[in-house]
Amino acid sequence: MTTPVTETYRADWDAWRAGWEQWLAQPHNWLSAVAVNWLDDTPRRFGGTPGLWWQDGDQVMIDPDGTTMAFDGTEFTEVRTFNLADGPDDQRVTAGDLQIGISYREGYHIITYDPSAPARKAFDGVPTFEPNPDWIITGRFEAFDSDQPLALATVGWREHDHLSPGVVHFEHDGTPYELQVIASAGRHTTVFADGTSGDTTYPAGRALDIPAPAADGTVTLDFNRAVNLPCAFGGFFPICPTPPAGNRYPFRIEAGEKTPAK
């Protein structure tokens, strides 16, 4: 029989779940994605996405084509050139109620977000396993001398290089395992797969944020807070990373989010 979590932990977990699902349901978030398109050097219209879009070398070109768009708070109605290749993913252009996220992977792709998307309107939460203290595991973080490149396959594109600051060593049922850590926007996170992947959880794996380790390197892995990748909510996120070989476990981690309802 599984030992129940404490009332304090349950209250904290419930509050985290409520905040996470509120974040998911924002007007221009994963649930509101309705289209993804890759750009080339030919100006193109893409379905319900306003304007003409193309790329010129490392630059993305946008012709509002009769609409008013805005980027970084500045409106424009004429052709604009943006060099976003060295910038963060998902930089947003606004066009009316829509937002268009721009990312670069040796070429630009755009994702259109519409607050009236059916997935967002139908959203009623993400199914989860019941929180289980057995999946709150103490590990030991081993930092590399410097961040190391980590090439990860994606769900709908080719490999992409990330940076790994180190690994977490942990045990499950007396067997040692490692968890490769990914550096992302100033924080530590990871992606993993396990025996539930493709069964009760999303086939490509799940994500887990990793807190800062203590001075002695100890770190808590709370798999009850494992969440789905954006690609689990629809086919509009081709650059979602998949787990490295070392983060694919033979046992079932029955904790965290299950496959989202469609």
Image (cartoon, rainbow, N blue to C red):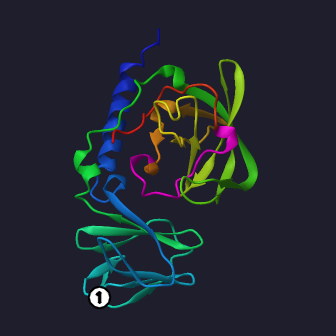
Residue where numbered disc 1 is placed: 77
Quarter-wise, where is residue 86 in the image?
Answer: bottom right
Position of residue 102 measured from the top left corner of the image (x, y, whole percent): 44, 70
Vertical comparison of 218 with 64: above or below? above
Position of residue 125 measured from the top left corner of the image (x, y, whole percent): 30, 38
Position of 236 with respect to 76 (left or right) is right
Magenta span includes 64: no
Tell me which residue sits at (70%, 18%) in the image. 174
Magenta span includes 246: yes
35 or 189: nearer the viewer:
35
Q: Is residue 78 visible?
A: yes
Residue found at the far bottom of this picture = 78
Position of residue 194 measured from the top left corner of the image (x, y, whole percent): 58, 32
Q: Magenta region: which residues?
A: 232-247
The kind of secondary structure element at disc 1 is loop
46 or 83: nearer the viewer:
46
Main SS type for the magenta part?
loop
Vertical comparison of 178 with 28: above or below? above
Tell me which residue sits at (58%, 45%) in the image. 190
Position of 154 with respect to 150 (left or right) is left
